[in-house]
C-alpha cells in the first residue's frame, strides 16, 4: 500500500497558508477579513474563558480539550466566512488578500500552538523549528495582522467610474 505521510506542524502551517491564500484569491479580501475577525474573536474567547468552561465544552463534544478548542476556532472562522459568502456579490481586491491570508494563517498557527497543553507544546516546539518560531513571534503576528486589517479598512474603495 502507499505510505500516507504523517501530519506534522509544517504540513498544517503550509496547508493553512495555501488554503487561506487560495480562498482569498478566489473569494476576495472582504471574505477573508471575516475569517481574520473570526480568528481574533475565537482566540479572545478562548483566552478569557475559564478552564471549567473549556472542559465542559470538551465533555459535551466528546473531544480532548485541545481538539475542542481548535474546533471552536475553526467553527467561528467558518461561520463568519459562510456569512460573508451570503452578503457579498463578487470578489474584490484579490491581490490585497494574499498578505492578509499569510498573516491570518501565521496568526492562527501561532496561537493554535499556544492552545496546546504544556507537554504537547514543548514537544512540538522542540521537534519543529517553524512551530518554535511561530510560538515565539505570535504577538508580532497578531500586531502585524491588526495593523494590516486597519490599513485595508482605511483604504478607500474605488468607484466604478474610477476603475474605467
Image (cartoon, rainbow, N blue to C red):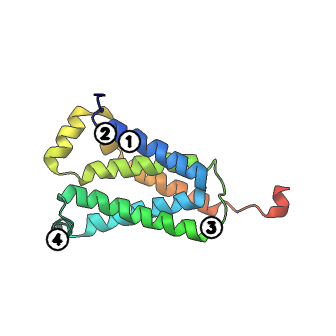
Q: Which mark is residue 82?
A: none
Give whichever of discs 4 and 3 has the lower sequence position: 4
Sequence-earlier tag: 3 or 2: 2
| Coordinates of residue 162 in the picture (x, y in percent) | 83, 59
- Residue at disc 2, secondary structure: helix
The CA span between labels 4 and 3 is: 36 Å
Q: Residue furthest front?
A: 1
Circles 2 and 1 in contact, beta carbons < 8 Å: yes
Asked which secondary structure carries label 3, the reply is: loop
Image location of residue 41, percent across then percent down? 39, 66
Of circles 1 and 3, the one toward us is: 3
Q: CA distance from mark 3 to mark 2?
A: 33 Å
Q: Is residue 11 left or right of residue 147?
A: left
Q: Is residue 43 visible?
A: no
Image quadrant in which the N terminus is located? top left
Please name the residue that numbered disc 2 is placed on: 9
Residue at horizontal 48 percent and vertical 42 percent from the top = 18
Real-space Cα separation, disc 2 to disc 4, in angstroms: 27 Å
Q: Is residue 66 above or below residue 59?
A: above
Depth order, front residue of 121/32: 32
Residue matched to label 4 = 56
In the image, 24 versus 63, the foreground residue is 63
Q: Residue at x 25, y 54 (%)?
A: 115
Q: Are marks 4 and 3 in contact (CB under 8 Å)?
A: no
| Chain-order first, disc 1 or disc 3 | 1
SS class of the residue under badge 1?
Answer: helix
Residue highlighted by disc 3: 88
Classify the position of the C terminus by image quarter. bottom right
Count the numbered circles shown: 4
The span from disc 4 to disc 1 (Cα, nearest Å) is 28 Å
Q: Where does residue 134 sit, x and y in percent of width and height?
A: 34, 42
Residue position marked by numbered label 1 in the rendering: 13
Amino acid at each position: 500500500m502507499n505510505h500516507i505521510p504523517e501530519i506534522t506542524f509544517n504540513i498544517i502551517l503550509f496547508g493553512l497558508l495555501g488554503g487561506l491564500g487560495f480562498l482569498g484569491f478566489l473569494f476576495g479580501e472582504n471574505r477573508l477579513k471575516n475569517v481574520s475577525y473570526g480568528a481574533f474573536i475565537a482566540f479572545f474567547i478562548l483566552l478569557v474563558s475559564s478552564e471549567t468552561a473549556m472542559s465542559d465544552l470538551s465533555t459535551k463534544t466528546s473531544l480532548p480539550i485541545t481538539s475542542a478548542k481548535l474546533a471552536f476556532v475553526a467553527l467561528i472562522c467558518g461561520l463568519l466566512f459562510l456569512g460573508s459568502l451570503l452578503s457579498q456579490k463578487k470578489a474584490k481586491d484579490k491581490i490585497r488578500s494574499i498578505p492578509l491570508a499569510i498573516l491570518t494563517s501565521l496568526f492562527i498557527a501561532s496561537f493554535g500552538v499556544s492552545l496546546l497543553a504544556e507537554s504537547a507544546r514543548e514537544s512540538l516546539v522542540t521537534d519543529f523549528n517553524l512551530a518554535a518560531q511561530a510560538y515565539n513571534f505570535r504577538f508580532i503576528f497578531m500586531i502585524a495582522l491588526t495593523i494590516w486589517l486597519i490599513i485595508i479598512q482605511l483604504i478607500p474603495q474605488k468607484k466604478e467610474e474610477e476603475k474605467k
